[in-house]
Amino acid sequence: MQYRIQLSAAMAEQLGDAITVELSEERVTIADIRKRLNEQYPEMASLLQGSFFTHHKRLASPDELVLPSDAVALLQSAPGMETVVSTCGLFAITYDPIDANEVASKVHDPSHGASLTFSGTTREYTQGQRTVLLEYEAYVPMAMNTMKQIGDEIAERWPSTRTAMTHRLGTVRIGETSVVIAVSAAHRDICYEASRHAIERLKQIVPIWKKEVWEDGSEWKGHQLGGWNPHNTQ
């Protein structure tokens, strides 16, 4: 039977958006699919080693059973694969320039005495290397879920706060905004704490990656705290 695997990042660039593997076993697991991919694409071994699978848009364990009709994706600690814009109330992912005022308006509350808007922009130099532009990609369904998870975390930790965030995909040039996070609360100290928590958690658990394009090359990278760890959800 044939199993279709959605690809991302460097693997998608080399092999296309999806590949199909043949497996004759009656019961097929994620581990079986990984093994067949290693056999079928030995040149991709280094990329496969740092990858993980999703099954119906959630993380999949190695012993999880898979049917040929199931939605299976292979993700890396690098870019994702969706090409759609997604929005859900306070959270959004878009290819368009972000309007910080529009994001901030989502957290307006007449009972709150403080609001804070954080904007992340593309800087020209990083450790002495000149950046020409950044390219962002994401696995949108999981990105939206984890963004909402961050909002829930903040609401639980700091009751009565409101958090909104919008992240941009595609090409983001020098000085342009890639992410805007808005927080409002009754008092300013909570605003500062919640805003910092939001951006740090976004970099830890949201599957959005960037490609740094320099004058003499490029490289896909994870967030600034290191490669994305899908199990780091605390």
Image (cartoon, helix red, strand yellow):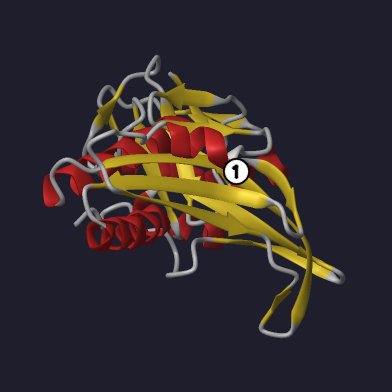
Q: The C terminus appears in which quarter of the rendering? A: bottom left
Q: Residue furthest top?
A: 69
Residue designated by label 1: 137
Q: Quadrant of residue 190?
A: bottom left
Which residue ends up furthest to the right in the rendered image?
Answer: 215
Callout 1: SS: strand
User: Relative to residue 147, is residue 82 depicted above or below?
Assistant: above
Residue at (66% x, 33% y) in the render: 95
Vertical placement of residue 124 versus 163, above or below: below
Q: Give the residue furthest to the bottom.
A: 128
Q: Position of residue 29 (x, y in %)?
A: 28, 34
Report x, y in % for residue 47: 54, 57
Residue drawn at x 35%, y 56% is 195
Left or right: residue 109 compared with residue 69:
left
Front position in the image: 119 or 50: 119
Up the image or down, 126 lies above or below 58; here it is below
Across and down, in percent, residue 13 comes to 71, 44
60 and 142: which is toward the camera: 142
Residue 187 screen position, x and y as percent? 23, 55
- Asked if residue 99 shows in the view, the reply is yes
Q: Residue at x 29, y 56 (%)?
A: 191
Quarter assignment of residue 84: top right
Judged left or right of residue 147, residue 81 is right
Left or right: residue 27 versus residue 183 is: left
Residue 122 versus residue 146: which sits nearer the camera?
A: 122
Callout 1 environment at 10 Å: few (<14), some (14 to 19), or many (20+)?
many
Residue 10 shows up from this direction: no
